[in-house]
């Protein structure tokens, strides 16, 4: 029987049981189901890269309502995404106790620009993109053939985008009310979402200046404002020297205003009521609700005895993080809402101390790291560490800032780690100002509570294998067929079995293997007789999420330095170079070809010829390979009438399927979608042609050259002997040891040291040593980690090489 540790997980989380043989998740959650939530964070060694370099990352999977690591999922999907080309690379990372690691080799064919790294578990897909992690990185390509691309892109950006600046106003609690003083927060933005300096005034219809304001460098600010009955107002100001006018939010004639001040021990709320509302509410009960992570952490009531009432709420036992305060009247109607950050008394710390403040090139560096809990005792901690050239800008993020802030509110947050930096004395005031504007009245847990969650994706305890068994002749699916899977190089159990359901589908999970491994899959009927046509499903489609836009301008000094490092990498990093000819694009003269019983014309469109190399075996299937490497290949829509396997191409704004040739044999794609399940070790070459028929309609043809025995036939259709790619095996970061060997080559490494998993000892201490490169510069050290008690910690340090 199939050992499904997923069952234990589901029982623990009060999930409903799912039959082993059911390959499709239940479409909606039963009423008794208790949902759980996950967040994932990736620390990368840096945010700016050259093509040909390695991108290193560590992964932390946490309970979404805290910062504790969780084992609810063991599979993490990490993808490198382009805004134009889609998914460029994808890894399945094995998570153990919430921790994982991996890397990407940045191919030479990648053009310069901003890219996203996306990470998610299968379970996260039930909640849209609310929990999907995304991070921007910039990749620079200085190869000659990409120079025209870079110049063209930069030129188009400069001419296509006109500067757009805006200012928005956010009354504390939700609304302005006549006769009541409100705190009004405001935020300015340029076209890239960056804050801009501004100053202005609130002007009455009589031309009087009621109040003036100006914002911080981050484009944030506040002012107090008490609108008068029967009066109208507008805002007039300047973005630098550029004048603007703007309207304030609508002003209510009656209502309540909420003002909140918080510190490490209390929340102090002041509730003001307009004259007309006070007449209605006098002597009646009003409630204050405080929620964190969608859960109630406080409910209290008080009577309206005067127009302004003050309430103090102790926060000693409240969880750390973003909370929502809601003011509810006696009829249960919310009147005011306010996001606040509960800081608590958490004083856990992670510190990094280099043994020196300045070093020579190639000198040994020793870092002493110590973790302590909230009361100063040693804390066992698992963390990752990166030491990289400070010339390249830091993205300003951290594990703490992501789990506690960035993942909870709407929009991009610049330099989020500053709000958790103990060396920033104004951080709590700045954080409160941020919450007054960022994500105002649109926060994560409300969206989940206000919608019906349909469970379409289950948590994964291991790798999953799905497929079908049907008649060898015909299309009837075969139920109650016994499926046996054997993997000689699986970790743990080698043999698994299950049975097809009434739709001829089977499902095996809890599997574990690394890299590209041979498997044997067979089907038999209830009498033990071999039978049926056994097929494996292709790779699951990635979720759809908005692409995070990067800053449009990279400083010339940074570009120049990256170019210098690029030239160094090409010259000295032996064994890391990538052949540029793995995609050979040839333009043809227009000519007629006879194919699929019709005459097609090449029309001069270039052919894409891809010779499959051992490095391509890491792709999960032909479908994955095509979507990643073939220009113009698009995923199939879920509503496709043929099926959800395969790829499409765009013709006149619509997606069309390609025709397929295998070893010069023409196939009807609707009948042989199983070709997309082929693993790349079975294929030697892929050729993609864009042709035109006699009616000027586009025809795309994929020609495959496959190895002998790759396509099972006849009596062996019930047996599959193939290779499947499992978990990605992370490579080891190379760190030279200059105490034992000298190298005549220049050492201009940008990432000096990377370690995805370091653990402190019982004293909460760890020590790390490595050697500098040759470049005189400043080195930034960043760590992210979680204690064994579930507290997220982040720390930074710097030193110089001179």
Image (tube, rainbow, N blue to C red):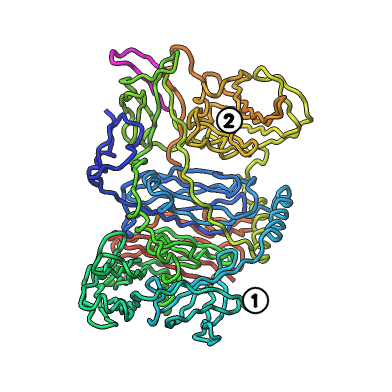
Which residue corresponds to the image point at 31% horizontal and 26% vertical from the top-left?
497
* Residue 790 sits above or below residue 685 on the image: below
Q: Is residue 520 magenta?
A: yes
Name the one closer to the observer, 299 or 432.
299
Boundaries of the magenta span: 519-532
Would you say 311 lies left or right of 738 here?
left
Q: Residue 113 placed where, x, y %?
A: 62, 54
Q: Nearer the viewer, residue 440 or 76?
A: 440
Q: Is residue 302 above or below residue 51?
A: below
Q: Secondary structure at mark 1?
A: strand
Residue drawn 58% across the image and 79% down it = 237
| Residue 730 seen in the figure | yes
Q: Horizontal placement of 720 versus 330: left or right? A: right
Q: Which residue: 45% across, 65% down? A: 366
Which labelled disc corresponds to residue 657? 2
Residue situated furthest right in the rendering: 589
Image quadrant occupied by the N terminus: top left
Which residue matches tag 1?
Answer: 242
Q: Quadrant of residue 137?
A: bottom right
Q: Is residue 253 left or right of residue 781?
A: left
Instruction: Look at the picture and state if 193 lies above or below 33.
Output: below
């Amino acid at each position: 029987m199939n050992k499904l540790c997923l069952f234990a997980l589901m029982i623990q989380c009060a999930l409903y049981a799912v039959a082993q043989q059911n390959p499709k998740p239940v479409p909606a959650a039963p009423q008794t189901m208790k949902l759980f939530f996950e967040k994932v964070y990736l620390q990368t060694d840096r945010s700016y890269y050259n093509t040909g370099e390695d991108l290193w990352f560590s992964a932390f999977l946490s309970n979404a309502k805290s910062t504790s690591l969780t084992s609810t999922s063991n599979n993490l999907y990490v993808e490198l995404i382009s805004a134009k080309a889609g998914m460029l690379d994808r890894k399945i990372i094995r998570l153990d106790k919430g921790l994982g690691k991996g890397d990407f080799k940045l191919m030479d064919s990648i053009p310069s620009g901003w890219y996203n790294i996306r990470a998610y578990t299968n379970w996260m897909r039930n909640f849209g993109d609310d929990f999907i992690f995304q991070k921007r990185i910039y990749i620079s390509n200085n190869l000659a053939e990409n120079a025209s691309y870079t110049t063209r892109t930069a030129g188009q950006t400069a001419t296509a985008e006109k500067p757009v600046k805006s200012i928005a106003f956010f009354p504390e609690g939700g609304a302005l009310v006549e006769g009541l003083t409100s705190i009004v927060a405001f935020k300015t933005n340029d076209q890239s979402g960056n804050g801009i300096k501004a100053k202005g005034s609130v002007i009455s219809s009589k031309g009087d200046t009621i109040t003036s304001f100006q914002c911080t460098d981050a484009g944030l600010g506040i002012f107090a404002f008490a609108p008068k009955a029967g009066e109208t107002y507008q805002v007039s100001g300047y973005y630098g020297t550029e004048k603007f006018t703007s309207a304030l939010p609508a002003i209510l004639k009656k209502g309540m205003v909420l003002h909140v001040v918080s510190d490490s021990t209390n929340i102090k709320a002041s509730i003001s009521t307009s004259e007309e509302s006070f007449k209605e509410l006098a002597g009646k009960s009003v409630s204050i609700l405080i929620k964190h992570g969608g859960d109630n952490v406080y409910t209290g009531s008080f009577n309206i005895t005067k127009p302004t009432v003050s309430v103090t709420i102790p926060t000693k036992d409240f969880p750390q993080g973003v909370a929502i305060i809601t003011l509810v009247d006696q009829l249960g109607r919310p009147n005011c809402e306010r996001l606040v950050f509960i800081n608590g008394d958490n004083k856990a710390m992670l510190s990094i101390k280099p043994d020196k403040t300045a070093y020579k090139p190639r000198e040994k560096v020793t870092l002493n790291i110590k973790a302590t809990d909230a009361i100063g005792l040693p804390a066992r901690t698992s963390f990752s560490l990166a030491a990289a050239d400070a010339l390249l800008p830091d993205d300003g993020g951290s594990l703490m800032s992501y789990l506690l802030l960035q993942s909870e509110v709407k929009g991009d947050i610049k330099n989020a780690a500053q709000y958790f930096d103990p060396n920033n004395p104004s951080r709590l005031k700045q954080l409160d100002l941020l919450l007054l504007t960022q994500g105002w009245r649109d926060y994560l847990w409300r969206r989940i509570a206000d919608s019906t969650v349909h469970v379409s994706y289950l948590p994964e305890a291991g790798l999953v294998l799905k497929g079908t068994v049907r008649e060898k002749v015909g299309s009837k699916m075969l139920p109650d067929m016994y499926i046996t899977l054997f993997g000689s190089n699986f970790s743990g159990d080698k043999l698994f079995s299950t049975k097809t359901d009434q739709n001829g589908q089977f499902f095996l999970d809890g599997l574990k293997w690394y890299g590209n491994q041979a498997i044997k899959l067979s089907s038999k009927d209830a009498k033990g007789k071999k039978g049926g046509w056994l097929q494996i499903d292709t790779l699951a489609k990635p979720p759809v999420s908005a692409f995070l836009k990067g800053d449009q301008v990279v400083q010339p000094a940074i570009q120049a330095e990256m170019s210098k490092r690029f030239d160094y990498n090409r010259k000295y990093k032996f064994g890391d170079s990538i052949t540029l000819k793995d995609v050979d694009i040839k333009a043809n003269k227009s000519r007629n070809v006879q194919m699929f019983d019709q005459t097609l014309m090449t029309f001069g469109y270039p052919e894409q010829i891809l010779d499959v190399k051992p490095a391509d075996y890491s792709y999960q299937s032909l479908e994955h390979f095509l979507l990643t490497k073939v220009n113009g290949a698009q995923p199939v829509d879920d509503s496709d009438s043929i099926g959800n396997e395969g790829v499409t191409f765009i013709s006149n704004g619509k997606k069309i399927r390609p025709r397929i040739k295998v070893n010069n044999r023409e196939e009807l794609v609707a009948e042989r979608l199983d070709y997309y399940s082929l693993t790349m070790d079975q294929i030697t070459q892929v050729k993609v042609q864009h042709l035109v028929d006699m009616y000027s309609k586009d025809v795309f043809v994929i020609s495959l050259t496959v190895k002998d025995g790759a396509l099972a036939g006849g009596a062996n259709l019930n047996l599959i002997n193939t290779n499947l790619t499992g978990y990605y095996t992370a490579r080891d970061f190379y760190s030279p040891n200059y105490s034992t060997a000298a190298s005549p080559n220049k050492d201009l490494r940008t990432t000096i040291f990377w370690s995805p998993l370091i653990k402190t000892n019982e004293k909460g201490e760890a020590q790390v040593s490595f050697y500098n490169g040759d470049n005189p510069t400043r080195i930034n050290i960043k760590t992210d980690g979680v204690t064994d008690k579930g507290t997220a910690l982040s720390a930074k340090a710097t030193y110089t090489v001179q």
